[in-house]
Amino acid sequence: MKSIILIFTIFLSSCSASKQNSNSLKYSKVYDYVSNEYKSSLDVSDTLVNIDIVNFSEEIAKEKNINMDKVLDSLTAINNKVNNYNYLLNKIIDKASSKSKYKIFFSKPKNNYLMAEVFTKEKDNSYDDLTTFSSSKVYLFEFDNNEISKTYNIILNYN
């Protein structure tokens, strides 16, 4: 009986490690995508933030030709299913540059989605500082088998 419990515990641990590696890979791919777009390394925040996926409802409804109410319901459900992940961004932070004029914040993974928000920084601002009377570029990445399958982006103005 003890051996069955031990095997089950090892199995659960390996599943958790696999999911953590999968999400680390997603963060790395998103960082590479965005830094290539900006043609610059980015300063990476070590804090995961809650970026509202509902901001993309209009773009998704148009592209998928789905009623806006259905899209809002689906995105709200995804937003409410967020688990309390605590993934380390160390590999990405090693690539990053604190001297960059851009700062990127990542969301927690939500199903097959990952979001990132990029601000032009004047100093080492916190997320709360940067979302006061400023604007940012927000990205929504959809993944299929750990590969980016679709990308959306919007400019978000904070007033």
Image (cartoon, helix red, strand yellow):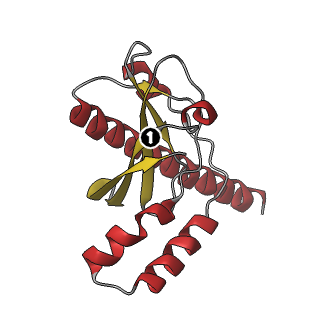
Q: Which residue is mark 1?
A: 135
Q: Nearer the viewer, residue 76 or 26?
A: 76
Which percent across, then down, holds residue 5?
Answer: 73, 59
Residue that appears at 39% across and 46% down: 26
Secondary structure of the residue carrying tag 1 is: strand
44 left or right, relative to 143: right
Residue under the image location 52 percent in, 45 percent down: 158
Q: Residues within 10 Å of mark 1 (few under 14, many from 20)?
A: some
Image quadrant in which you'd find residue 41: top left
Residue at (67% x, 52% y) in the render: 84
Residue 129 vertical placement versus 106 (above, below)? above
Q: Quadrant of residue 82?
A: bottom right
Above or below, 152 relative to 89: below
Q: Locate residue 99, reporting x and y percent.
A: 40, 12
**38 with respect to 9 (left or right):** left
Observer-nearest of 143 and 36: 36
